[in-house]
């Protein structure tokens, strides 16, 4: 089986490449290296790497040759970047998905699994989030991800292409890049604490998130690609549990054995108070549940950081 991973040099994509390689897939990566790194693919040296842009149909069609299954991870994943450049990010986040679907259809690929996001739920208060709830995408990022979900469903309905979209909640794990202020909060806190610098908590720290470990997200992708009868479906990928930022701070400080007071700052504009998945649909139809507890995930991550 040949698998194409778009965005395969990124945080989540590279873990997916490692697992697919381990499972015996012949893996092709299409990535423009805008945020991805070649070093993320060091564990899978046999991967065929194509440098190219998902917004360029010919590049996608070329990478698609002989592919059976596609894992579409490439995106401008930073919400602020999509607010700054809605036209450019639309080419990647929506047109890129359309290119993947159309190239897959033309090449006779059987399945496409696409990365979506909990951002499609916006700031509506009802919790936990279920797939059938009202959606409220609040950024170009969320609108393009929702449009991509609809395009995936459309290709299933029109062409029978087996598409599945996964709404990831807050993913964390090794290789998450802490370099931007809008990187995942765990990667930022860990990077600062391990350098002896105090992180900033925006707001009172009581806000909660559903942190899901990257290896569980990889398992969800593989389940989505290998389960029959789920074409055209959308699934939440989260743990059903929420952790407050203050708890996160304490757990990280404890595991790193540091004692630093966080800097407190005003809440971020547009910050959502609480977010947590109801992931029972994935449990029922994909037989997927998060297996790595928050504490274990953080332990694995801290061990990697300390090793470096
Ligand atoms: P990432 O930035 O590490 O990975 C994205 C990858 O896509 C990078 O390797 C980047 O170089 C590549 N890429 C970007 N634009 C491209 C283009 N035009 N053509 C080809 N490649 C391109 O981010 P990530 O956290 O690994 O995100 C992976 C996917 O998961 C994205 O679709 C993102 O929207 C989604 N997602 C992530 C999270 C999270 O918590 N990390 C949450 C919800 C959804
Ligand atoms: C996540 C996604 C984002 C979008 C959004 C939709 C990530 C990295 N971001 O944003 O792409 O889908 O959900 O709701 O997955 N914080 C601090 N200090 C810091 C950094 C963050 O206090 O240095 C806070 C931040 O204000 C927020 C929480 O930590 O309350 C989580 O922040 P995040 O950027 O990791 O993720 P989130 O949920 O805001």
Image: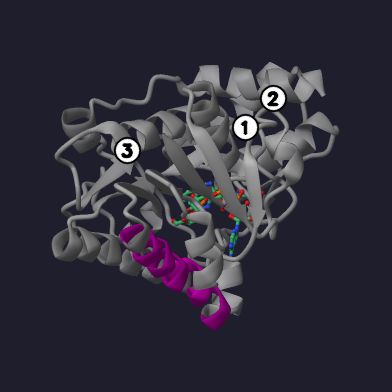
Q: Work out whether residue 180 or residue 89 is closer to the camera in this orientation and state it.
A: 89
The secondary element bearing badge 1 is classed as helix
Q: Return the residue at label 2.
A: 253
Q: At x 39% / y 19%, what residue is drawn?
A: 291
Could you tell me if residue 123 is visible in this image? no
Residue 188 relative to residue 192: left or right: left
Q: At x 59% / y 79%, what residue is drawn?
A: 85
Residue 115 relative to residue 91: left or right: left
Comparing marks 1 and 3, which lies closer to the viewer? 3
Crowd band around label 2 with a 10 angstrom C-alpha radius: few (<14), some (14–19), many (20+): some
- For the record, the magenta segment spans 87-105
Disc 1 to disc 3, C-alpha distance: 35 Å
Q: Work out whether residue 177 or residue 38 is closer to the camera in this orientation and state it.
A: 38
> Do the residues bearing badges 1 and 2 touch, measured as CB atoms within 8 Å?
yes
The secondary element bearing badge 3 is classed as helix
Crowd band around label 1 with a 10 angstrom C-alpha radius: few (<14), some (14–19), many (20+): many
Q: Which of marks 2 and 3 is nearer the N terminus?
A: 3
Q: In this view, does 245 lie above or below 24?
A: below
Residue 133 relative to residue 179: left or right: left
Disc 2 to disc 3, C-alpha distance: 38 Å
Q: Work out whether residue 76 or residue 108 is closer to the camera in this orientation and state it.
A: 108
Q: At x 57% / y 51%, what residue is drawn?
A: 7
Could you tell me if residue 118 is visible in this image? yes
Q: At x 30% / y 37%, what residue is drawn?
A: 224
Q: Return the residue at label 1.
A: 249
Q: Return the residue at label 3.
A: 225
Q: Is mark 1 within 8 Å of ligand 2?
A: no
Indicate which disc residue 199 carries.
none
């Amino acid at each position: 089986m040949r698998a194409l991973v778009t965005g395969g040099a990124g945080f989540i994509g590279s873990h997916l490449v490692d697992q697919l390689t381990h499972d015996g897939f012949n893996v092709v990566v299409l990535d423009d290296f805008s945020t991805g790194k070649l070093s993320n693919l060091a564990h899978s040296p046999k991967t065929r790497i194509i440098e190219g842009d998902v917004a360029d149909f010919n590049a996608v069609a070329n990478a698609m040759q002989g592919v059976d299954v596609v894992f579409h991870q490439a995106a401008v994943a930073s919400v602020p970047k999509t607010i700054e450049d809605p036209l450019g990010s639309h080419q990647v986040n929506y047109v890129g998905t359309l290119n993947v679907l159309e190239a897959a259809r033309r090449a006779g690929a059987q399945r496409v699994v696409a990365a979506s996001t909990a951002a499609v739920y916006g700031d509506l208060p009802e919790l936990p989030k279920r797939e059938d709830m009202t959606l409220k995408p609040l950024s170009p990022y969320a609108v393009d991800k929702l449009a991509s979900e609809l395009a995936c469903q459309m290709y299933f309905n029109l062409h029978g292409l087996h598409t599945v979209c996964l709404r990831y909640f807050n993913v964390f794990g090794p290789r998450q890049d802490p370099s931007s202020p809008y990187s995942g909060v765990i990667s930022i806190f860990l990077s600062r604490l391990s350098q002896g610098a105090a992180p900033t908590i925006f707001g009172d720290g009581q806000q909660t998130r559903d942190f899901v470990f990257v290896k569980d997200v990889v398992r969800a992708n593989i389940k989505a690609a290998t389960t029959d009868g789920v074409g055209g479906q959308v699934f939440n990928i989260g743990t059903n549990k929420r952790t407050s930022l203050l708890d996160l701070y304490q757990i990280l400080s404890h595991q790193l054995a540091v004692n630093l007071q966080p800097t407190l700052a005003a809440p971020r504009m547009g910050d959502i108070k609480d977010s947590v998945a109801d992931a029972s649909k994935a449990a029922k139809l994909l037989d997927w549940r998060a297996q790595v507890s928050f504490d274990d995930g953080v332990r694995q991550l801290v061990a990697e950081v300390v090793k470096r």
